Image (tube, rainbow, N blue to C red):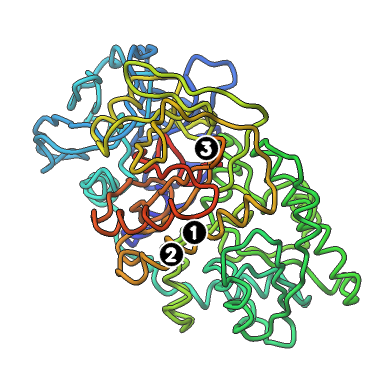
């Protein structure tokens, strides 16, 4: 994200491993040390060459980068008594020049950390603080070393770009000599180089990413060298296959029985993703063989984007948040063999849409909400056994586990239900409670939440159809009202929480985001929410409708 933000300022930036030697970085105009999930005292934690601070090159540390800078230069880092996850208010001191120039005062920032700097290195000044973080910004202007504990790269730090702009232009002295808007010719050239005379075969989902990647390859190589197939896994949304059939140069492969059979009885979310990924590879192998594409003249194309690789631990020191189906072992083997092209792997969702607009793709396609590759399987949560809910002073703990990211690392934890749609309370609980990573509130239920329970459930065709029907209701009503254009994504999740007569509940997860790396839960208009709940509660097997109030981080946009 940091590299992307710098490029958007018109300055070239690239990502290097944290242990890159100072000698290799000596020609850079500036260095940014990013955030990360580790503690500086962990034996396996990433570090940096201390000599970078003696190069005379400006260095900016962010989150873990501030802690690492302080640690390497003789300061002290301690485990925090209370982490900060989400919005915080920064009080920043006045500065005449440097990163903090013109930014003094009270302002909103985004925090995601537990460790803190307890003592700054010699020569440094504390420039900013929050209510729970006494050292939120530090500087040694004489050596052009700066650091912040909060995240500058996310949209929820509204002035983050100003900090990065100050560092890039005023501290590092860069000029705007790189234009990120005109990407298509470069991407087409990269595709031709990766293909190296071979043809490309795509499995197209019908979503934005795979469709843009497919179109890019077709433009770069010609329609006669690019083929595509859509695999109907039985895990797609209502009307999805019909929508994809309207796209040119695609065929449809019916693999519903194969996928649903392989997933029968599975409850673990990571196992679901692995199975789906491996089944995709099996389908691919079968289709390639049947269509005589086994020779070395064909390679696989994919619409993988950068957040997929980050959340799958795709860089040397990146934490695994969840395994994306494009990054399972079978796909990795193709990558290692050099038989894959992923033209969008360094781009974010908003950038992919920009590329699609440059390609002239229709707004109907480009404005579709993101939909996960594994489909409804990861929105249909399962449980291995019956479990009661647990009432606490803070709310009702639901023993259904969802994936989250706390302190930049993965967590699987239960969900807590509170009484009202209160975002402030949800944020406070997430920061305070270590044994939950998601907060929901009941909107309408057929029974009190305290009387409901988690029931043993697997990924059955009946439950998938129940979720598909619920998702169709939500999409129809939000589209009719225009609300679908007001949010970035709106996952609809089925959880095995209910009564004997109605064993499942629906969770609504509308979020606002720019690139999918961070997100805010947003509340929909009351009349629309009532209409959705009314239809959902009349659907077979649905005992309740809940609203996800959790920001990302700590809760990922998807529940699995």
Would you place residue 179 above or below residue 153 in this image?
below
How many C-alpha atoms fall within 10 Å of the one at disc 2: few (<14), some, or many (≥20)?
many
Foreground residue among 201 and 262? 262
Characterize the local packing of mark 3: few (<14), some (14-19) or many (20 or more) Cα atoms within 10 angstroms: few
Task: Find the distance from the CA under tag 3 to the CA under tag 2.
Answer: 54 Å
Instruction: Tell me the mark number nearer the camera, choosing from 1 and 3.
Output: 1
Marks 1,2: beta carbons within 8 A? yes
Which mark identifies residue 321?
Answer: none
Tell me where residue 49 appears, x and y as whole percent.
50, 28
The answer for how far apart the CA atoms under marks 1 and 2 are is: 6 Å
Work out how far the residue at label 1 is from the one at label 3, CA to CA, in angstroms. Answer: 54 Å
Which of the two residues, 265 or 73, is positioned nearer the viewer here?
265
Q: Secondary structure at mark 3?
A: helix
Q: Secondary structure at mark 2?
A: helix
Q: Can residue 350 be seen?
A: yes
* Residue drawn at x 36%, y 64% as measured from the top left: 478
Q: Nearer the viewer, residue 379 or 291?
A: 379
Quarter of the rendering containing residue 268: top right
Q: Secondary structure at mark 1?
A: helix
Mark number, residue 471: 1
The dot on residue 23 is 3
Q: Which residue is mark 2?
A: 475
| Position of residue 191 in the picture relative to residue 431 (left or right) | right
- Spot occupied by residue 104 in the image (x, y as percentages of width and height): 10, 37
Residue depicted at 64% across the width and 81% down the height? 245
């Amino acid at each position: 994200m940091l590299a992307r933000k710098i490029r958007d300022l018109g300055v070239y930036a690239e990502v290097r491993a944290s242990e890159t030697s100072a000698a290799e970085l000596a020609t850079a105009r500036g260095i940014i040390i990013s955030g990360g999930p580790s503690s500086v005292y962990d034996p396996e934690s990433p570090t940096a060459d201390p000599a970078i601070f003696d190069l005379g090159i400006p260095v900016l540390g962010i989150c873990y980068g501030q802690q690492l800078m302080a640690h390497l230069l003789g300061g002290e880092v301690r485990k925090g008594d209370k982490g900060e996850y989400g919005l915080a208010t920064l009080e920043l001191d006045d500065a005449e020049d440097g990163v903090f120039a013109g930014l003094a005062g009270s302002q909103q920032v985004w925090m995601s950390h537990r460790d803190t700097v307890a003592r700054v290195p010699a020569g440094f000044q504390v420039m900013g603080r929050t209510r729970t973080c006494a050292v939120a910004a530090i500087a040694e202007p004489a050596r052009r070393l700066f650091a912040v504990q909060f995240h500058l790269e996310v949209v929820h730090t509204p002035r983050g770009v100003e900090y990065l702009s100050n560092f890039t232009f005023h501290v590092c002295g860069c000029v705007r000599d790189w234009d990120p808007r005109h990407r298509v010719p470069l991407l087409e050239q990269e595709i031709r180089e990766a293909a190296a005379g071979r043809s490309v075969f795509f499995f197209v989902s019908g979503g934005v990413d795979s469709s843009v990647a497919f179109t890019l390859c077709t433009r770069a190589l010609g329609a006669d060298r690019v083929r595509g197939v859509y695999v109907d896994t039985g895990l797609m949304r209502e009307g999805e296959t019909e929508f994809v059939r309207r796209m040119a140069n695609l065929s449809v492969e019916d693999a519903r029985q194969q996928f649903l059979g392989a997933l029968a009885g599975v409850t673990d979310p990571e196992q679901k993703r692995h199975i789906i990924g491996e089944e995709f590879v099996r389908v691919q192998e079968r289709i390639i063989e049947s269509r005589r594409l086994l020779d070395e003249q064909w390679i696989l194309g994919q619409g993988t984007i950068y957040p997929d690789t980050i959340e799958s631990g795709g860089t040397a020191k990146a934490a695994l948040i969840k395994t994306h189906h494009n990054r399972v072992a079978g796909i990795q083997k193709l990558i290692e063999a050099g038989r894959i092209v992923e033209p969008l792997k360094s781009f974010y969702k908003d950038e992919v849409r920009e590329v699609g607009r440059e390609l002239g793709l229709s707004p109907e396609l480009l404005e579709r909400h993101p939909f996960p590759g594994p489909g409804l399987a990861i929105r249909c949560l399962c449980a291995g056994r019956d479990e009661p809910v647990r009432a606490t002073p803070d709310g009702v703990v639901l023993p259904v586990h969802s994936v989250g990211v706390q302190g930049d690392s993965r967590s699987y934890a239960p969900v807590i239900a509170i009484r009202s749609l209160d975002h402030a309370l949800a944020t406070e609980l997430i920061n305070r409670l270590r044994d939950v990573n998601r907060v929901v509130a009941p909107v309408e239920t057929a029974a009190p939440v305290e009387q409901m329970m988690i029931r043993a459930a697997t990924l059955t065709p009946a439950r998938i159809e129940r979720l598909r029907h619920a998702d169709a209701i939500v999409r129809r009503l939000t589209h009719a009202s225009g609300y679908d254009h007001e949010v970035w994504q709106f996952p609809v999740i089925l959880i095995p929480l209910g009564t004997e007569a109605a064993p499942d509940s629906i969770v609504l997860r509308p979020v606002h985001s720019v690139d999918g790396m961070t997100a805010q839960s947003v509340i929909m208009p009351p009349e629309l929410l009532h209409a959705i709940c009314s239809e959902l509660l009349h659907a077979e097997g649905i005992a309740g409708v809940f609203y996800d109030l959790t920001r990302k981080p700590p809760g990922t946009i998807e529940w699995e």
